[in-house]
Amino acid sequence: MKRKILKKKINPFEPKIGLSIITALALIIRLLPMRFKYLLGVDPYFHLTYIEEALKAGKWFNFFTIAYGPWGAQMKASSPKGLWMTPAYVYDTLKIFRISLYNAFRITPVIFGVLTIILFYLTVLKFYGERKAFFASFFLATSFGHSFRSMAGYYRGDNYMLFWYSVALLGIVYAIRMKKRLGNMRLLLYLIPALASGLASAFWQAYYPIFVFLLLNAVLFSMGAFLLNRDEYIVDGLALTIATAVGAVIANHIGEILGYGILGYKSGGGKVLTKKLSLEFGYVKDAYLLIHLKYLVPLAILAIILLIGLSHVLKDRKRRIITISVLLLVGTIVLFARFPALRDLSSGFGVVKSNPLIVETLPSDFSDLWRSYGIGILLTPLFLVRFLPSRAKPHDFMFLGLIVPSLYMLKTWTRFLFIGSMSVALMAGVGLVELYEIISKLGLKKSTALSLVFFLILPSINVYVGAKNTWEQRPMINENWEKALTWLRDNSNENDVVMAWWDRGHWVTYFTRRPPVAQAGPNVGVAKYYLGLLKENWAESSGVDYVIVSYYDLLEFGSMVYTANAKGNYGLVVIPLVSSGEKLVFQGAYEGTSYRVEVSKGKDWETTIYYQGQKFPPRGVYIEYQNETIKPEVPNPISNAYVYINLNYGYAVLMNEETLNTTLMQLWIQPKSPYKLVYSDGGMIKIFKLEHPNVAIERENGTIIFHFENATGTGLGIWGFLDNGTLVFHKWYGVKGKETFELPSEVKGIVIRYAYAEGKKIVDRGIFRRDFSP
């Protein structure tokens, strides 16, 4: 008996073993960023700040006053509240194990990412068997395309959409597979995708692809059943189509409670889209849901009913193929001729637009695909083997409903590399095993070598690519930023507004608990301000009290010029220190051009620029060392070039005169009134106080006091809002000659906006909540 047990082969594809391997692999890769102190990227900091403030307040409030200064943010217009509630519930569940909110937040994307992989495995297992399920989920587990939005510390909403889609797929596979056991009662299982698609709307503002996937799954499944003479399954497509309609109704109801998506009735995109399609909001208050229910679902139902009717007339497969081809061609032409606005469906009705300053909105190239999917992207064509007449099944057609739009999305935005990861994994995993089975049937002798290549070497490449790219991810923030922003929080008023370049805005919100002017996207006003195209009057009218400039802003100077659409002749290059012998040598390349600066140590700091085969002295040199910036004399300057040298961190900035005269560089090198340097680490981050008539809020025994610094103002405008954003109070008060002013009891509203004015000129603005302080 013992010998028999020992001789029994272990099958790694057996579900218990295979799923355990996949789960462990997925967890290991996605937990790699836990070794870092900081979160990844910038957006997670905004989400975590709101969660922390909501838990501190004891409620999921709407009006978030420490974002988008000096106006504040309406969170219901940002994302559905489920996005923030989920990490809070994870924390509430895990805190008995002494897991902090910070760590619960970090591991939440891992939890849902791994659950997605498990559910995907179970779906493919039911449709395709053990081996194909193993390799499809293996490719998903090791795909950087999936891990980069489901790894620890990088919290994004699209993770939830793919999770709920995997729930929907599992419901679909059980509805199909339970035909013999449950008969037509199995159709009730399509309530699972109905619930899943509806619930997806609670977690991400751009959840709409789940409805597109499921609707195409439905139509293509019925089409596959029709083409393959499996007429008994055509009705499944009808049931799934109706399920998406139910899901849309659920999503509409959830939107009323937790907030609508980016095409909601109050959003600009939603208003534009309904106007373009001559639609009106009524019971349904989301433009996509309205289109889904009014156009897409009826058209899908009509198409499937037509297939049911044709199935009773046409029995020959060839005739069915010809009929489907003609119907598809004619139907597409008629559809877009009758409803021309639907042509924008492929671009998300105008939502999907590229911005060269935001990497995730750029189109994907092959390097992006390889980095995201490794060898998997090259294996995807093998999935077409499934459509050989001897192998095709209706569910192969169904999965085209995921594959076709996913591949289109991959081409459009790099952000969609995550959403497309499931289709790539399915095609690669199933296709790999299909090819192996075909080759094996040819009777090749070297089956062991073949197995080694197919089942070990090729998958190992994916493990390496996925794990390597995940390992190489680094937090964008660092200790320099934490120290600077923590200092600002400790040395500023709760209502002070901060100016920083937009992709540092969420860090400002998190570490300072102060509202930045710009965050989440490029801001034209801020860009023009840094370039000097807008002056201090604009900053004062925007409520700015502190201005942050940084080394990282110098690296993104070109982005500022692009955002401002500035027409000037700007030029700036940051070059590193490469040698520090008798001469300091700074050298680097930018856009294929080499730059070199040599500086002789000593009293005169003689500086020479090498550029395109020429060498010449700059017109001006600025050298920062320790806490001092000096300007050595430059004999016989003949160029329009200036050099700033930082000896604390070892870099130089080569620029022309127009760039030197921008507000950014003037603050960085030689700040003047009305700016006062209040924080500097010697060359990475500098913080300036904009000295102007300023309002500081103090809370004393339940009373709110306005303190006026440089009290030259004559009027104080106060606006009161309910938490839902409704304006309930507005009045101007005379404050000429006053240094303090108590918030009057007549002021209504929980959120207060104010404007401090000299005559008609606004010199300060701000916003705060009456019920609690950040």
Image (spheres, rainbow, N blue to C red):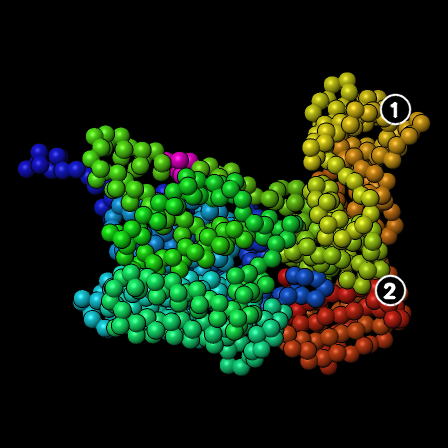
Magenta span: predominant SS is helix
Location of the N terminus (image quadrant):
top left
Q: Give yes or no for residue 358 being in the magenta stretch.
A: no
Residue lying farthest right? 636
The residue positioned 85% from the left and 60% from the top of the image is 537
**In this picture, which residue range is highlighted in magenta?**
460-464
Nearer mark to the viewer, of 1 and 2: 1
Q: In this view, does 729 lie above or below 169?
A: below
Query: Along the horizontal axis of the image, is 359 left or right of 115?
Result: right
The residue positioned 21% from the left and 30% from the top of the image is 445
Q: Where is residue 368 in the image (x, y as percent from the top left)?
A: 52, 43
Of the pair 314 and 730, the residue shown nearer to us: 314
Q: Give yes or no for residue 463 being in the magenta stretch.
A: yes
Of the pair 438 and 735, the residue shown nearer to us: 438
Query: Along the horizontal axis of the image, is 54 left or right of 534?
Result: left
Q: Earlier in the sequence, mark 1 or mark 2?
A: 1
Circle 1: element type: loop
Quarter holding residue 142: top left
Q: Position of residue 520 (x, y in %)?
A: 63, 56
Q: Please, what is the three-letter code of the amino acid marked with disc 1?
A: Asp
Circle 2: element type: loop
- List the residue tagged with mark 1: 604
The residue positioned 34% from the left and 33% from the top of the image is 457
Q: Please, what is the three-letter code of the amino acid marked with disc 2?
A: Ala
Q: In this view, does 689 lie above or below 229?
A: above
- List the residue tagged with mark 2: 711
